[in-house]
Image (tube, rainbow, N blue to C red):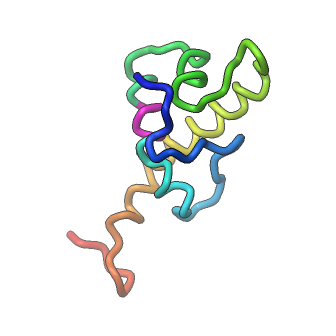
Amino acid sequence: MTSQPDNGAAPSDEAPDCPLLTAYDHLHHVTYLRLLDAEEAGADWREVARIVLGRDPAIDRDGARRCWDSHMARARWMRDTGYRQLLTIPGGKTPH
């Protein structure tokens, strides 16, 4: 894993917490995938926060944990629910 964000944009302190996809979600979709992959691999949250989110728990443990918790929650939401919005086509229809 590299310590570079997926698109050059550093993740915010907190991910969005709303029922709709946001521009932030589109910008950081690879970040969410990396978080889910790391979770599946059993990686330690501190290492993931440092490498994927650019937050160093050795410097700010609480801030790094909040950032990780927030982005993991959003990654899980994208995996479980939010992805459906990516499938919506103009006119509000969903392909079958």
Q: Is residue 92 magenta?
A: no
In the rendering, at what x and y percent does residue 63 appear? 77, 29
Image height check: is 78 above or below 67? Answer: below
Q: Nearer the viewer, residue 1 or 20?
A: 1
Q: Residue at x 61, y 29 (%)?
A: 54
Q: Is 64 left, or right, of 5 in this rendering?
A: right
- Name the residue at 44% across, 41% down: 6
Residue drawn at 70 percent across, 17 percent down: 57
In this view, 27 is above or below 74: below
Residue 53 located left or right of residue 56: left
State the quadrant of the C terminus: bottom left
Q: Position of residue 41 (x, y in %)?
A: 38, 17
Report the side of 21 relative to 63 (left or right).
left
Q: Quadrant of residue 72?
A: top right
- Where is 10 relative to 39, above or below? below
Taking the magenta stretch, the answer to whether it contains residue 35 is yes
Residue sitting at x 49%, y 54%: 27
- Residue 8 located left or right of residue 90: right
Q: Nearer the viewer, residue 26 or 39?
A: 26
Residue farthest along the left direction in this orientation: 96
Q: Position of residue 28 (x, y in %)?
A: 49, 48
Looking at the picture, tell me which residue is in the foreground, 30 or 95. 30
Q: Which residues are magenta?
A: 31-36
Count of picture labels = 0
- The quadrant the N terminus occupies is top left
Quarter of the image holding residue 18? Answer: bottom right
